[in-house]
Image (spheres, rainbow, N blue to C red):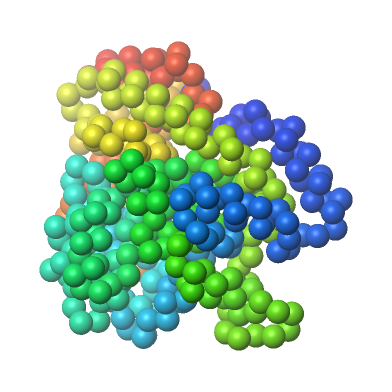
Amino acid sequence: MIPFLDLKQINAPHQQALEEAVQRVVRSGWYILGHELSAFEDNFAKYCGASHCVGVANGLEALQLILQAYDFPRGSEVIVPANTYIASVLSVNFLDLVPVWVEPDPTTLLIDPTQVEEKITNKTKAILAVHLYGRSCDMSALRTITQRHDLKLMTDAAQAHGARHQGQRDKMLGDAAAFSFYPTKNLGALGDAGAVVTSDATLAEKIRYLRNYGSLQKYVNDYQGINSRLDEIQAAVLNVKLPYLDAENERRRQLARLYLNGITLPSLVLPPADQIEDDAWHLFVVRHPHREAFVAYLSEKGIQTNVHYPLPIHKQKAYQRYHDVSLPVTEQIHREVISLPLNTVLTDEQSAYIIESINQFA
Ligand SMILES: Cc1ncc(COP(=O)(O)O)c(C=O)c1O
């Protein structure tokens, strides 16, 4: 069986360094807000081409903390893509803000900038662009809109560590970017972790307060914050893995190229290849009109796949109030998408076998 993702194997090349890093923290006696975290924050800010990184507990809270720091009035609207992971939208609801759905471009499956402006009202405060599957949204088009309407442009970069827009990493961040280091991500911790990356010094400082009960000084609380700190063990793990991120993304890119050049099955829609160098290739998402049959066939061939995601957010039980909303492009995408195995330990031989099997699907 070719597994979709085997985290044990993926972390195996780093195992010794990870164990040493964890041991170093255990022995240090300092577990929260210490040197490992400040080193990671410096390293990751530099890597992203931004001035600040604030480590937080996970990607969802990174999004929430950006919105809390902006302090938009209750009931303000945030433009969100309808095709995303539920965390993007939960963050908006948790701050008593209103998500305003925008359908994806049917080719990129990312927020369609040409449909954004018609959704802007006098209550709109921000656009939340999600770089889903590792591909950067059209940040230039979105920036033109946010400038015209004086809105914030925030990004959900949970799936896009190392992605670029027009060749530059800093151009995919927007005003503030939320990252997740959930273990399956391109840069994955050994537990939950996240970060906000921004070049807005005021915003970064406010998030530093908010992640720690609103405090930068022991028992002095300037804001009603939350507890969302990235702990020293996870920061140490991320310090071990960050230097390998570019090489690992390059391997993902090679595999994506093999798929894009090798798969010829006419009924299968491949992801666009126009940003192959800029894309972080977190997921390789294809579409087939007969998904169940295609997935069952690959499974018989010993190829494990995944679906990101099977049910749109507005159709989830958690969001019954949106069940009547019609988002036909998003709904069709959710019926058809399949994620093929693409990870740093997949071999050329395995990818050749996957390509050959797909091309033989009748
Ligand atoms: C697009 C997207 N946004 C947000 C998140 C939330 O990240 P976390 O699981 O670290 O809270 C994830 C990952 O799970 C994600 O894929």
Is residue 288 placed above or below 216 in the rendered structure? Answer: above
> In the rendered image, is residue 133 in sight?
no
In the rendered view, would you say 121 is above or below 169? Answer: below
Residue 187 lies, in percent from the top left, at 54, 43
Q: Quadrant of the C terminus?
A: top left
The residue at 20%/82% (across/down) is 122
Q: Position of residue 2 (x, y in %)?
A: 49, 24
Left or right relative to 342: residue 216: right
Determine the residue positioned at 23% across, 68% down: 147
The image shows residue 190 at horizontal and vertical percentages of: 64, 46
In the rendered image, residue 105, in percent from the top left (x then y), is placed at 19, 49
Relative to 353, does residue 154 appear above or below in the rendering?
Answer: below
Q: Tell me what residue is drawn at x 39 percent, y 43 percent.
A: 163
**Relative height, residue 226 to residue 298 (above, below):** below
Residue drawn at 60 percent across, 56 percent down: 41
Q: Is residue 345 visible?
A: yes
